[in-house]
Image (cartoon, rainbow, N blue to C red):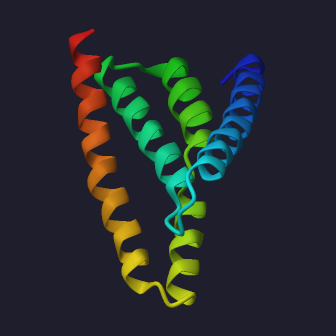
Amino acid sequence: MTAVTWVAVAALGSVAAVSRFLVGGWISAHISSPFPVGTLVVNLSGALLLGLVAGVALSGNALVLVGAATIGSYTTFSTWMLETHRLSADGQKSMAVANVMVSIVLGVAAVALGRAIGGWL
């Protein structure tokens, strides 16, 4: 990869991470729930976008910049796992299981939808 690609990865990753923070925070501020809705919305929208990227068959530097740098920095596996752990530790085990199941089922569906849309483009 070129130096320009590395700089683009850093820039896009930074913007995407800040976007994740803003979107997740805004959702959480507007939807009062012990369920981590903000993280769910971020991860599902990221899954949809990554499916779209797969559907349009990006490759090379475009795939690195859009898929890994941008969408990879926007979505958040670690926060999802931490929130699931916190729910369980707080005695909300059914909510923790629901967080895992809903995230997986809707995440796979979002990727499939994005890929289908990308294939149509």
Q: Position of residue 108 (x, y in %)?
A: 28, 48
Decide if residue 49 is on the left or right side of residue 121: right
Across the whole image, how many numbered discs are drawn on residues? 0
Residue at (43% x, 76% y) in the render: 96
Q: Nearer the viewer, residue 64 or 27?
A: 27
Q: From the viewer's perspective, is residue 39 above or below residue 62?
A: below
Residue at (56% x, 88% y) in the render: 89
Q: Nearer the viewer, residue 28 or 121?
A: 28
Q: Position of residue 71 (x, y in %)?
A: 54, 35
Q: Position of residue 94 (x, y in %)?
A: 36, 81
- Can you say which quadrant of the picture contains the N terminus? top right
Q: From the viewer's perspective, is residue 84 above or below residue 61?
A: below
Quadrant in the picture for residue 120: top left
Residue at (40% x, 19% y) in the render: 58
- Can you say which quadrant of the picture contains the C terminus? top left
Decide if residue 6 is on the left or right side of residue 47: right
Q: From the viewer's perspective, is residue 29 above or below residue 90?
A: above
Residue at (35% x, 25% y) in the render: 52
Q: Position of residue 82 (x, y in %)?
A: 59, 71
Quadrant in the picture for residue 90: bottom right
Q: From the viewer's perspective, is residue 105 above or below residue 62?
A: below
Decide if residue 94 is on the left or right side of residue 71: left
